[in-house]
Image (cartoon, helix red, strand yellow):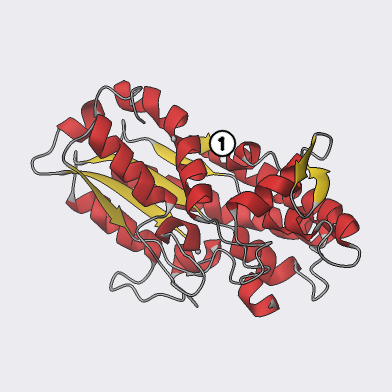
């Protein structure tokens, strides 16, 4: 179980608001691209199925294609199990890239398609956190998260800088914060309430680093953590079979596989969860694609 959790995000929101493909996407000949980087979320990982075409990147591409950029094509270089370190350097990456790393594959694509990339999205970092800080008890050590988070941030800053340099001005780069599937431990295991609260404190350290790093690097942020309301222990809802539980716990169980009987503790989003993630990107991207 821990091995599966430690490869979390393993393979690791444009409808009517979008009215244009942006000047950067109009400059080149041929199709317009959406370039996606990341871990298992970027490739729509599902338990016992692996990568699918139902991840948030696929949903986002379909929505933009339908409503704004008819010739949009998704170029997804995401890698199941990727960390910020392996994405940056290629060392110990679960995936093999002729270019040497996922980042270099993305940079090469941007360089080869000047003026044809409308936007870039990225999700990375969860595997770094879990590989280092997740204990067999399913406790994520907050002290470990505080130690690891700045290192993730340093590598993420390098990644965004390389993408920005290759993409050139006018190509939006949007990163994301992460939902916290470990909230699902609430009421499902002995001491689950304590674990859920403790893990959320560590998760908050991680997400705050991501958000600050993206902002400092000039990228936009899709706040998936807020969509999943991961800090909201105060509001409660009644869930059949579970009774009254915090809304953040309910959403973690409703939009991921973590609480399911068949795939218990699998942290990946289900199809609804991926649609919610895509929906979080929509309002962030809309004004950027209009400009």
Residue 200 drawn above or below residue 8: above
Q: Which of 194 and 123 is in front in this view?
A: 194
Residue 200: image location, x then y, percent: 78, 50
- Image position of 1 (left or right of 172): right
Q: Nearer the viewer, residue 47 or 65?
A: 47
Question: Quick one: SS at disc 1?
Answer: helix
Q: In which quarter of the image is the N terminus?
A: bottom right
Quadrant in which the C terminus is drawn? top left
Is residue 179 in view? Answer: no
Q: Where is residue 41 in the image (x, y as percent from the top left)?
A: 49, 58
Q: Where is residue 228 in the image (x, y as percent from the top left)?
A: 64, 42
Which residue in the protein does label 1 denote? 216
Give the percent coordinates (x, y) of residue 110: 26, 50
In the displayed structure image, the side of residue 61 where residue 237 appears, left or right: right
Name the residue at 58% across, 71% down.
7
The extreme left residue here reads 29
Query: How many residues crowd around disc 1 within 10 Å: few (fewer than 14), some, or many (20 or more)?
Result: few
Residue drawn where x is 62% and y is 75% of the image: 4
In the image, what residue occupies the spot 27% across and 22% down?
A: 19
Residue 190 found in image quarter = bottom right
Can residue 101 be seen here?
Answer: yes
Outermost residue toward the front? 240
Task: Say which quarter of the image contains residue 29.
Answer: top left
Say if 219 sits above or below 258 in the image: above
């Amino acid at each position: 179980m821990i091995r599966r959790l430690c490869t979390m995000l393993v393979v690791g929101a444009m409808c009517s608001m979008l009215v244009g493909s942006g000047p950067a996407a109009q400059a080149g000949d041929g199709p317009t691209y959406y370039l996606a980087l990341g871990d298992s979320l970027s490739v729509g990982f599902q338990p016992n199925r692996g990568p699918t075409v139902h991840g948030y990147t696929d949903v986002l591409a379909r929505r933009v294609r339908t409503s704004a950029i008819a010739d949009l094509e998704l170029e997804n270089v995401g890698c199941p199990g990727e960390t910020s370190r392996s994405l940056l350097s290629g060392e110990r990456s679960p995936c093999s890239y002729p270019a040497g790393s996922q980042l270099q594959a993305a940079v090469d694509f941007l360089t080869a398609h000047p003026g044809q990339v409308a936007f870039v999205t990225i999700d990375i970092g969860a595997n770094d956190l879990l590989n280092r800080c997740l204990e067999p008890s399913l406790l994520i050590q907050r002290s470990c998260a505080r130690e690891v988070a700045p290192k993730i941030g340093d590598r993420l800053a390098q990644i965004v800088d390389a993408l920005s340099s290759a993409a050139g001005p006018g190509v939006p780069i949007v990163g994301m914060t992460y939902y916290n599937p470990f909230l699902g431990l609430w009421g499902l295991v002995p001491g689950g309430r304590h674990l859920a609260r403790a893990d959320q404190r560590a998760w908050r350290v991680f997400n705050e680093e991501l958000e600050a790093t993206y902002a400092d690097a000039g990228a936009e942020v899709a706040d998936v953590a807020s969509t999943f309301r991961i800090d909201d222990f105060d509001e409660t809802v009644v869930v059949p079979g579970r009774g009254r539980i915090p809304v953040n716990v309910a959403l973690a169980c409703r939009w991921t596989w973590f609480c399911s009987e068949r795939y218990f503790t699998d942290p990946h989003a289900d199809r609804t969860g991926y649609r919610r993630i895509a929906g979080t990107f929509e309002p962030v991207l809309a004004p950027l694609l209009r400009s």
